[in-house]
Amino acid sequence: MSEPEPIRIILIDPVAESVTEQQLVLDLQTLYRLLECSTIDAFRFSPSTLAYVDDNGLYRPPDENGCVPHIWFRAANQPIVGRVVLTGMPDADGYETDCTLTTQQVRDAIERFANEPLLGL
């Protein structure tokens, strides 16, 4: 089995309303740090892209105004609360690969950044 190599990821931050590219070796501790959480979940963002999110994001407490920073994607039917890390799909050894989407493609997939109450979820 080969050692993990640095890969290209995209980090989406709803608080900063930013989509940024980074090059790093991705392991579980790095995911926890990037996502600012202690439990993660993953889903297929596109046929070639994996998204990592905070598994307990919807349970994050609201701010003093009752609002929670989150992201709505055009193809999603619920908000994603907290940061999102995008990678390529895993290789034969189980390691994530470079994210092939551009930051502009990711921005285009975001319907909106929001900081509002998440009532009814």
Image (cartoon, grey):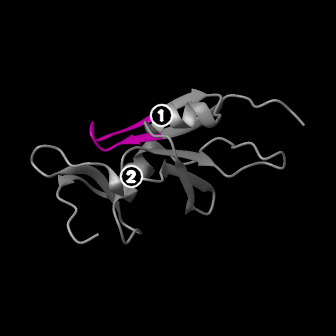
Position of residue 24 measured from the top left corner of the image (x, y, whole percent): 60, 27
The single residue placed furthest to the left in the displayed view is 65
Tell me: residue 93, above or below residue 43.
Answer: above
Task: Name the residue located 37 percent from the left edge and 50 percent from the top edge.
Answer: 107
Point out the image quarter for the C terminus: bottom left
| Secondary structure character of the magenta stretch overall | strand
Left or right: residue 63 versus residue 4 is: left
Task: Name the residue located 43 percent from the left edge and 50 percent from the top edge.
Answer: 106
Which of label 2 and label 1 is nearer to you?
A: 2
Which type of secondary structure does the marked residue at label 1 adopt?
helix
Position of residue 97 measured from the top left corner of the image (x, y, whole percent): 69, 43
> Which contiguous range is marked in magenta?
11-21
CA gap between label 2 and label 1 equals 14 Å
Task: Name the residue located 45 percent from the left edge and 39 percent from the top edge.
Answer: 35
Q: Amino acid at mark 1?
A: Leu
Tell me: residue 75, above or below residue 33.
Answer: below
Q: Quadrant of residue 37?
A: top left
Closer to the camera in the image, 57 or 110:
57
The residue indicated by pointer 2 is 57
Q: Residues within 10 Å of mark 2 (few under 14, many from 20)?
A: many
Q: Is residue 12 magenta?
A: yes
Position of residue 95 measured from the top left corner of the image (x, y, whole percent): 74, 42
Q: Quadrant of residue 93?
A: top right
The residue indicated by pointer 1 is 34
Position of residue 53 measured from the top left corner of the image (x, y, whole percent): 48, 50
Q: Is residue 43 magenta?
A: no
Task: Name the residue located 63 percent from the left edge and 33 percent from the top edge.
Answer: 26
Q: Quadrant of residue 1?
A: top right
Q: Amino acid at mark 2?
A: Gly
